[in-house]
Amino acid sequence: MSLEVREAAEALLSGEEREPLTDAWPELDVDTAYAIQDEALRLRLERGETLIGVKLGLTSRAKQQRMGIDSPMLAWLTDAMVLPAGVPVPSLLHPRAEPELVFVLGQRLSGPGVTAATAMAAVDRVYGGVEVIDSRYRDYRFELPDVVADNGSSAYVTLGPVGAQPASLDLSLEAALLEVDGAIVDTATGAAVLGHPAEALALAANALGARGRALEPGWLVFTGGMTDAVDVRPGSRVAAHFSNLGSITLAGS
Ligand code: OOG
Ligand code: MG
């Protein structure tokens, strides 16, 4: 691994706000960005965190248009990123929240050749979830390699209260209402996520397979923001209400 990769991983893991890597390193490519992401994960595991799954980012048009990037990406989730329901969002740089559909895997899944149908067959349970993102880049200004290196802006994930059998729901029709301080500000259904969130799961399995890895049994897979993300301001309350998968409320601090 190059010195630049190690240094970028350490700098991003420090959590300090910074300019995008590509400002000073314009030739940074996506493969090298994933090497930075993997090195940051290695450092997290070295300090005692456990790998619990992955998240996809930029899988809906709402998110792609807002960030100006139209390729989905993958990032790691560890146990330190789990925010239990009811715990206020810790103080962060500029937290935003987004409703997501979440899979818990029953079986190992790895590409190539994983389809939405074979991906769904590996799913044990489906949950509603909320991801809190917090880009380390000032003003959320980044290119694709920057956000990949920054582990997809990951900060926290919260799982909803209902774990449904995958066959019991039509996930393309599962709706999320996003509420801020009592007002509904956005809505979407699962179809917003690549047409069906199982497509995001298949994409994750194939992308990890290409990197010589797999989605493991028991892992969480956050399939990407269905709507645009909203700011989590101190004192404000953000809630996601799913049609069949319950509600999650976050309090800003
Ligand atoms: C990148 C992370 C995107 C999602 O669900 O689309 C993401 C960002 O918007 O900062 O987590
Ligand atoms: Mg997300």
Image (spheres, rainbow, N blue to C red):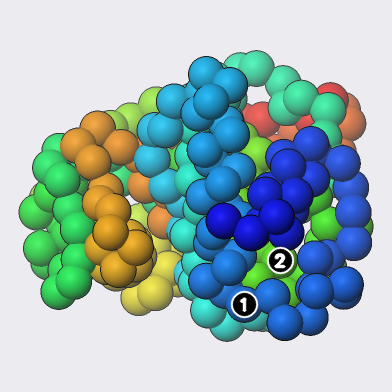
Q: Quadrant of the N terminus?
A: bottom right
Q: Position of residue 173 (x, y in %)?
A: 32, 63
Question: What residue appears at the point 19 percent right and 58 percent down from the top-left corner?
Answer: 110
Q: Quadrant of the C terminus?
A: top right
Earlier residue among tags 2 and 1: 1
Q: Which mark is residue 239?
A: none
- Label 2, ligand 1: CB separation under 8 Å: no
- From this view, report whether residue 51 is shown above or below residue 224: above
- Amino acid type at circle 1 is Asp
Question: What residue appears at the point 51 percent right and 50 percent down from the top-left corner?
Answer: 38
| Residue 37 seen by the camera | yes
Question: What residue appears at the point 75 percent right and 33 percent down from the top-left corner?
Answer: 237
Q: Secondary structure under badge 2?
A: helix
Q: Position of residue 184 (x, y in %)?
A: 67, 52
- From this view, report whether residue 250 is shown above or below residue 98: above
| Residue 247 seen by the camera | no
Q: Position of residue 161 (x, y in %)?
A: 39, 26
- Amino acid type at circle 2 is Asp
> Is 125 displayed left or right of 96 in the figure?
left
Q: Secondary structure under badge 1?
A: loop
Residue 114: image quadrant is: bottom left
Number of other residues with Cα within 10 Å of mark 1, as a class: few under 14, some 14 to 19, many 20 or more: some
Q: Position of residue 181 (x, y in %)?
A: 78, 38
Number of other residues with Cα within 10 Å of mark 2, as a class: few under 14, some 14 to 19, many 20 or more: many
Say which residue label 2 marks.
146
Say which residue label 1 marks.
29
- From this view, report whether residue 136 is shown above or below residue 80: below
